[in-house]
Amino acid sequence: MAPPGRKKEKVLILGASFAGLYAAKFLHDEACKVGLELPEITLIDRKNYVLFTAFLPEILSNQVSPYTIMPSVRHVLGNRQVDFRQEEIQNVDLEQRLVRTDRGVHRADRLVLALGAVTNYFGREDFARYGFPYKTMADAIRLRDHVLSCLERANISNDQAERRRLLTFVQAGAGCCGMEVMTELRELVHRVAGRFYRNIDAARDARFVLVEGMERVLPTLEPEVSLAAEEKLRKRGIAIRTRTLVTGAGPGWVELNHEEQIESETLIWVAGIKANPLVAALPAGHDRLGRVVVDEYFRVPEYEGVYAIGDCAACPDGQGGTLAATAQVAVQQGPALARNLVAEWLGRSPKPFRFRYRGDLVSIGSLDAVCCPFGWNVFGLSGWLLFKYVYFSKLPTVQSKVRILGDWLANFLTGPSIAMLEAVRTDASGLAVPSEERLIGIV
């Protein structure tokens, strides 16, 4: 029951990715656990599924199919008393805690911003036009279709320069996600070349260039892990260019460091993210990425009853900086906020958030990975098995777990599918349309 004199509060959570969804789930569960009257919990998102991003790179190599790693929000919530609404958020009034959507107006006693992040092109229109981001399911499908289109055209081309351009893949960004995307791309090309595309010899014709502005790949991990990953990638024939920036892009070319031009029709852009534009435009304090500045309780200082979590929040790390925008942070913030809200309703003091780093697991191709769980380094097959097991166990539904086992088995026994979903359209010259024109329905 609610404490005497306390009304039943309305909690409105904007965004159903990891942070928002976990906040809604745990808020319901924590309230039930302590016998508190359930608040009115409303969860709003423009999509009705949550994307399990740990396996998103495997879409590229067809190890998993799209619907396997995008369970519906309603399925994840189960029988919890959470009112999920698939609506497009139009504007947010922080002072009044009022949200307007394409379906109406919502008011709240507690407003939680969990709207995530978008790809950061650093203000460069050429990167947005000619680059292929890799953050959403639409991005993954679009890039995969583009790669298959390049393979199709290269297979029938008698022009060696054209074949080389079509089969040269340049990627900006060598963080954890970037490493996985590049190695899954290489896996796909090498598995289908020669077998399905008989005129293509991957070892001879394909070129993979990984570009990183920092001094080493996986710059956020320990040097030992970075060096191990770099050595493994070089053995796979992936060219690594550290201390190098992509400085330009156009139809059929990518420029590095303002001096070198690589003939390529594929620039993969995983070089950074920034806050959702809706969040970045709010009248609150922001960091350089547009994230809302919050305190250690996730409160937006300027507005009572307003909180921010996940990729759209600049949360203090306890050491004078802010926490990175990662899924590992988001899945800890959602439950922490839920417990603090319940504590406040019970008249107790909330606890400041302290992120617990559990290590990183990075797959770098079939049967190989570099992992550093809890400070231990696990490489090779053992690391790959650990990667698969840990993220498999974290899939939010039994349905997803059953499906992914079937996907992995089918891929192992029969190889990847090379059917295109027509998520990418090309102009008369064969150039992909701008990345803003995404596959409708998968965003």
Image (spheres, rainbow, N blue to C red):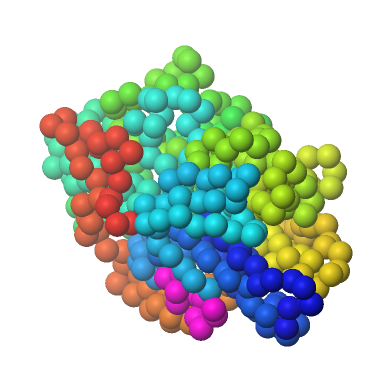
Q: Is residue 278 above or below residue 189?
A: above
Q: Does residue 327 appear in this view?
A: no
Q: Is residue 47 above or below residue 134?
A: below
Judged left or right of residue 390, residue 31 is: right
Residue lying farthest top?
Answer: 259
Judged left or right of residue 431, residue 314 is: right
Q: Does residue 48 appear in this view?
A: yes
Which one is nearer the viewer's eye here, 396 or 163? 396
Residue at the image point whose x is 37% and y is 73% from the top: 407
Spot occupied by residue 297 in the image (x, y as percentages of width and height): 77, 54
Which one is nearer the viewer's eye here, 65 or 81? 81
Magenta segment includes 154: no
Q: Which quadrant would residue 419 be assigned to in this image?
A: bottom left
Give, as a single range, the part of the protein colored magenta. Answer: 72-81
Spot occupied by residue 203 in the image (x, y as percentages of width and height): 36, 45
Residue at the image point whose x is 65% and y is 59% from the top: 110
Which one is nearer the viewer's eye here, 435 or 363? 435
Residue lying farthest front?
Answer: 5
Judged left or right of residue 65, residue 373 is: right
Spot occupied by residue 341 in the image (x, y as percentages of width and height): 73, 65
Q: What count of labels does the image hold?
A: 0
Spot occupied by residue 437 in the image (x, y as percentages of width and height): 28, 41
Residue at the image point whose x is 43% and y is 46% from the top: 90
Image quadrant in which the N terminus is located? bottom right
Residue at the image point whose x is 19% and y is 38% from the top: 426
Q: Is residue 44 above or below residue 182?
A: below
Magenta segment includes 77: yes
